[in-house]
Image (tube, rainbow, N blue to C red):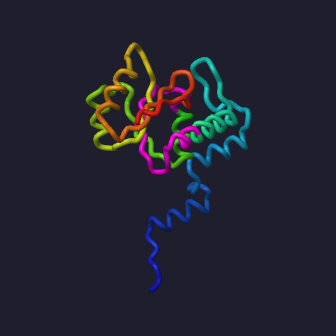
Amino acid sequence: MKPTITKQDQLQIEYEEKGYWQTYTLGEHLRTWAQQYGDRIALAGQGRDVSYNALNQHADKLASGLHQLGIQRGDRILVQLPNSIEFVVSCFAFFRLGAIPILSMLAGREADIDALCALAEPVAYITTSCFLGFDYCSMAGKIVSKHAFLKYLILDDDSIADSLTLN
């Protein structure tokens, strides 16, 4: 029996042929962009510029560090970071690993984060120590103490690749 091709399948084939639909992951796209755009500015903020090459290298370095910690493909990571270069680097590192970022609003507080953790059961929680006067580090400590599945608390202070193994 001949397999049926749905309208959605036909559209996908058509879009792939036209170059609209690409089968690369975002992590793979970043490698291509780094080759294509090199030292051109990919990100600007916080008083610094980051080139496509540097973004690609930082994402690789962080992905490697996370992998060495034990974070694997399919692991869920709760992300509560401000809009920053570290946020972008982190997301690309997760995409490279195949880890699943659970994105949380920075305005979320203990009850919100606790509920997300209970639902998603992430192995890691990445946040900032302090932002706009709020102590995220203290809140993260409380969250981690409630959930045994949270093995890693990662802070973006000096270097997002520096992390603390909790269990």
The image position of residue 109, as x and y in percent, is: 31, 25
Left or right of 101? Residue 48 is right
Residue 82 lies, with reference to residue 28, above or below; the image says above
Q: What quarter of the picture does the N terminus occupy?
A: bottom left
Left or right of 95? Residue 143 is left
In the image, farthest residue toward the front: 167
Q: Is residue 74 magenta?
A: yes
The image position of residue 54, as x and y in percent, is: 68, 33
Picture quadrant of residue 61 = top right
Magenta stretch bounds: 65-87
In the image, farthest residue toward the top: 133
Picture quadrant of residue 149 = top left
Residue at x 41% of width, y 30% of height: 80
Residue at x 45% of width, y 50% of height: 74
Toward the viewer: 162 or 62? 162
Residue at x 38% of width, y 18% of height: 135
The image position of residue 131, as x and y in percent, is: 43, 18
The image position of residue 148, as x and y in percent, is: 33, 39
Toward the viewer: 84 or 153? 153
Q: What quarter of the picture does the C terminus occupy?
A: top left
Left or right of 104? Residue 12 is right
Residue at x 43% of width, y 31% of height: 153
Picture quadrant of residue 79 = top left
Residue 40 lies, with reference to residue 11, above or below; the image says above
